[in-house]
Amino acid sequence: MKAKLSPAETEIFELIGQGKSRQQIAHVRCRALSTVNNQCLVIRLKLGLSNRDALVAEAVRHIENIEKNTIVLTNGHVLP
């Protein structure tokens, strides 16, 4: 990431990467859709992304990287 995202922005970014719609994100975060839309714009600007598609693609790559770096043991414990 090019810029530091706030905890709320990081949560939204990760929810986007998990395939959640803006409406779903608004519901999960108990925020208005307009608030989520504004936060998505701020995230795009901070990351230097040109459009929504680029935001989604970057968020999906972020989630894939998180998953690649996570090890789940047979007993269910997760190692970072």
Image (cartoon, helix red, strand yellow):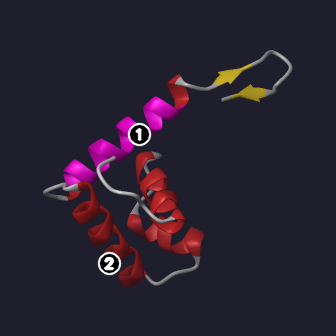
Mark number for residue 38?
Answer: 2
Tell me the chief SS of the magenta region: helix
State the residue at coordinates (49%, 73%).
26
Q: Quadrant of residue 30?
A: bottom right
Rendered location of residue 14, percent (x, y)? 47, 51
State the residue at coordinates (33%, 56%).
3
Q: Is residue 57 magenta?
A: yes
State the residue at coordinates (66%, 29%).
80
* Looking at the image, residue 74 lies above or below residue 17: above
52 left or right, relative to 36: left
Which region is colored magenta? 53-66
Q: Residues within 10 Å of mark 1 (few under 14, many from 20)?
A: some
N-terminal of the two: label 2 or label 1?
2
Q: CA–CA distance between discs 2 and 1?
A: 21 Å
Q: Nearer the viewer, residue 56 or 69?
A: 69
Rendered location of residue 19, percent (x, y)? 43, 48
Which residue is under mark 1? 62
- Three-letter code, disc 2: Asn
Q: Is residue 55 magenta?
A: yes
Rendered location of residue 47, percent (x, y)? 26, 55
Q: Element type at marker 1? A: helix
Q: Element type at marker 2? A: helix
The tally of labels here is 2
56 left or right, relative to 53: right
* Looking at the image, residue 18 lies above or below residue 41: above
Mark number for residue 32?
Answer: none
Q: Residues within 10 Å of mark 2 (few under 14, many from 20)?
A: few
